[in-house]
Every structure is written in C-alpha cells, then in structure tokens.
Image (cartoon, rainbow, N blue to C red):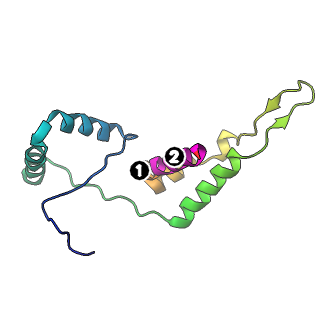
C-alpha cells in the first residue's frame, strides 16, 4: 500500500447496524473538537491496561460462500408468489426454517459480514 500523504489524518466510517458502533458514534459526537485527544486516551488506555482483552481478528471471508449466499437470497426474493386456488390469494414461497442454517453463516461471516450482505441487499432493492 502506498504511503499516505498526511500521516496524521484518518477517515473512518462506523457501521450503523452495529449497536457498539452506534454507541461510539454518540460518544465521539459529544467530544466536539476533542475527538483526537479522546481517541488517543482510549487507545493508550487499551494498550496499557492489563485487564484489556486482545482485539479479536475478523474471520477471513470466502468470496465464493458470500456469492452463493447472495445468489440464494436473490433467488428467494424474486420467486413469483404462488396462487392458492381455493382462496385466490397469493402465497409467498419461503424456505422452511429448518432448512436455513444461519448459525453456519453467522460463524463464517460474522456480524460485519452479515451486515454488509444486508446493506448490499438493501441497495439492490432501492435500485
């Protein structure tokens, strides 16, 4: 990665889908023009506090698994609704709960991965 022009400037974006991120957003917004000092204090405390747990490393994402999940979701979203001849009303075809293994996808993708997929799906719906 090429070296940054200005080593002292950063741009970060938090996830509104993550409650912990929303809490940090609120705290940082309360700091006004003292955000940098607040972050310095927080990082220094984190590094030097013996009770601080290690930073968890994000699980690596398998692009093929993510693509398969997105394809499956897209197919489910665009299945035509079946018509029940006795009632004349449309019924949506949803997979049975037992056939969906969310625990596996959650473990593989993590909260951030699932949030990214949900945001991508929302963007597709908009247009």
Query: Mark 1 or mark 2, which has the lower sequence index?
Result: 1
Task: Return the x and y of residue 79 as percentages of the image width and height.
Answer: 75, 46
- The segment highlighted magenta reads 114-126
**Residue 122 on the magenta span:** yes
Q: Is residue 94 left or right of residue 61?
A: right
Magenta stretch, main secondary structure class: helix
Of residue 39 and residue 96, the one placed in the foreground of this image is 39
Name the residue located 12 percent from the left edge and 51 percent from the top edge.
Answer: 43
Tell me: residue 12, above or below residue 16.
below
Task: Return the x and y of residue 3 as percentages of the image width and height.
Answer: 20, 73
**Residue 95 on the magenta span:** no
Q: Which residue is mark 2?
A: 118
Name the residue located 70 percent from the left edge and 43 percent from the top edge.
Answer: 95
**Image quadrant where one finds the N terminus:** bottom left
Of residue 49 and residue 79, the one placed in the foreground of this image is 79
Name the residue located 59 percent from the left edge and 55 percent from the top edge.
Answer: 69
Task: Return the x and y of residue 115 as percentages of the image width and height.
Answer: 45, 47
Q: Residue furthest bottom?
A: 2
Task: Return the x and y of residue 45 as percentages of the image width and height.
Answer: 8, 48
Spatial distance from mark 1 to mark 2, Cα to Cα? 10 Å
Q: Is label 2 in a helix, a strand or a loop?
A: helix
Q: Which residue is mark 1?
A: 112
Q: Is residue 35 left or right of residue 102?
A: left
Name the residue located 11 percent from the left edge and 54 percent from the top edge.
Answer: 47
């Amino acid at each position: 990665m090429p070296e940054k022009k200005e080593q002292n400037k950063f741009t970060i974006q938090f996830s509104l889908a993550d409650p912990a991120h929303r809490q940090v957003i609120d705290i940082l917004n309360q700091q006004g023009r003292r955000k940098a000092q607040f972050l310095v204090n927080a990082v220094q405390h984190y590094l030097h506090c013996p009770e601080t747990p290690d930073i968890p490393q994000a699980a690596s994402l398998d692009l093929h698994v993510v693509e398969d999940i997105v394809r499956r979701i897209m197919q489910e979203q665009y299945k035509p609704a079946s018509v029940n001849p006795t009632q004349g009303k449309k019924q949506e075809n949803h997979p049975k709960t037992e056939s969906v293994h969310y625990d596996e996808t959650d473990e593989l993708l993590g909260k951030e991965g699932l949030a990214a997929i949900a945001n991508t799906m929302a963007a597709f719906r908009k247009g």
